[in-house]
Image: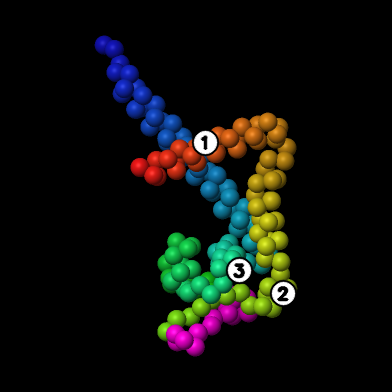
């Protein structure tokens, strides 16, 4: 009895898909751990540092907008924000023209005393640059090209 080439191809595709998913999960897990370690160096939790980065980039967000961006529940984000408000890092502002909303932003004192852009660059540098520092530059280029190609494939499928 001969194997059906289409069935074999589907089995191969399923196996390869599972392997790609496993790799992405591993990368995500490692990056999450590195981000937690990095945040601790600055005296924050990873979610707190994420909130700081988001509010620095987009000041004046509401709690709903922030929770949507972070893909976390409103109550979770509310707890994170409350702790940052208590530390004087985040400020809540109620606009005069709409007293029903609360806008969140980073305090001027915190921005003055901390290079938030520098912190973010250091995070990226630690997570990626250190990992590729001892690699053959040609291998790094191969990884980059493979990731670009995979991204292109994902975007192409998204457009369908």
Q: Residue 75 at x, y = what percent? A: 43, 72
Q: CA distance from mark 3 to mark 2?
A: 12 Å
Quadrant housing residue 9: top left
| Mark 2 surroundings: few (<14), some (14-19) or many (≥20) residues within 10 A | few
> Which of the pair 97/30 is nearer the observer?
97
Q: Which residues are magenta?
A: 82-99
> Which of the pair 84/139 is nearer the observer?
139
Q: Residue 78 at x, y = what percent? A: 48, 74
Q: Is residue 88 left or right of residue 102?
A: right
Q: Which mark is residue 149?
A: 1
Marks 2/1 in contact by CB < 8 Å: the verdict is: no
Q: Which residue is mark 2?
A: 112
Q: Residue 157 at x, y = what percent? A: 39, 40
| Residue 133 seen in this snapshot | yes
Q: Which residue is mark 3?
A: 56
The quadrant the C terminus occupies is top left
């Amino acid at each position: 009895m001969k194997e059906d080439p289409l069935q074999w191809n589907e089995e191969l595709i399923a196996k390869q898909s599972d392997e790609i998913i496993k790799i992405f999960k591993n990368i995500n897990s490692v990056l999450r751990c590195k981000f937690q370690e990095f945040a601790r160096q600055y005296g924050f939790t990873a979610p707190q540092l994420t909130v700081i980065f988001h509010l620095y980039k987009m000041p004046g967000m509401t709690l709903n907008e922030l929770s949507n961006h972070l893909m976390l529940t409103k109550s979770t984000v509310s707890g994170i924000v409350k702790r940052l408000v208590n530390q004087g890092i985040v400020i809540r502002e109620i606009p005069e023209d709409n007293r029903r909303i609360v806008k969140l932003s980073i305090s001027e004192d915190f921005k003055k005393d901390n290079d938030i852009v520098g912190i973010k660059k250091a995070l990226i540098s630690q997570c990626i640059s250190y990992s590729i520092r001892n690699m053959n530059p040609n291998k790094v280029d191969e990884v980059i090209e493979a990731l670009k190609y995979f991204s292109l494939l994902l975007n192409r499928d998204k457009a369908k």
